[in-house]
Amino acid sequence: MGTNTMKKGFIDGPVKVLRKELVKTEPIGLNEFKLTDQSWLGKRQVINAEKTIPHLIEQLVKTGALANFQNYGTDKFEFKGLWFADHDVKKSLEGFFWNQNFVGNEAFSAFIQECTDALKNAQEPDGYLNTWFGGVHPDKKFSDFASGHEMYNAGHLIQSAIAQNRVSENAP
C-alpha cells in the first residue's frame, strides 16, 4: 500500500526534497544570488512592485476579499465573492513577501500588516481559517474536499507563511 520513501532518498517534510548525494541540483538560498533591476526577472519584480501589487491591493479591497476576514465574526460580516475568495488574500500575501525581499520596497508593509491582522481576526480558536465555510456554512466544514477549496486555501496560507518566514528575520 504505502511506499517507504526513505529508501528512495526522500527526507520527511515539504521543503527538503532529496538527499544531496542523490541529486545533481538543489535550490539555492536567498542570499546566494542578487537580482538587479536590469535582469529579466529583476525587471518583472520591479513591474510587480509598481503595477501588479497596487492593482492587487485595489482588487482585494474592491471585491471584499479582505473585508471577509476583517468583518468575520462581527455583525458587519457579509461574505463577498466566490467561495474560494480567501485564496486571493493568502496568495497575494505570498507575492507581497517575495517582492519586498527582492525589490526592497517597504511601501506595502502597512497593507501586509492589515492583511495579517485580518487573518488573525478571522482565525477560530481551534485554528480553522476559512471565511466561506466558517461564516456562511459552518455545518459544512471539511465536507467537500473535491471542490470546497478549504485545503487549497490552507495551502496558500502555508505558502505565504513560508515566504514570510524565509524573507523576514522578525516574521510575526
Image (cartoon, rainbow, N blue to C red):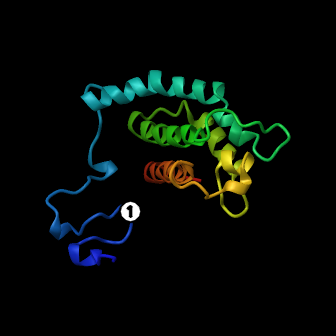
Closest to the observer: 65 or 32?
65
Dot 1: what SS?
Answer: loop
Q: Is residue 132 visible?
A: yes
Q: How many marks?
A: 1
Residue kind at label 1, given as amino acid type:
Pro
**Can you give x and y, in whole percent of width and height, for residue 40 in the image?**
25, 28
Are there few (<14), some (14-19), or many (20+) residues within 10 Å of tag 1? few
Find disc 1 in the rendering and name its residue: 14
Q: Is residue 169 visible?
A: no
Q: Residue at x 29, y 40 (%)?
A: 34
114 lies above or below 145: above
Q: Residue at x 32, y 49 (%)?
A: 31
**Can you give x and y, in whole percent of width and height, for residue 122 in the image?**
71, 49
What residue occupies the far right of the structure in this picture? 75
Q: Residue at x 50, y 48 (%)?
A: 156
Could you say which quadrant of the image residue 142 lies in?
bottom right
Q: Residue at x 63, y 45 (%)?
A: 116
Closest to the observer: 47 or 58?
58
In the shown orientation, is residue 68 left or right of residue 167?
A: right
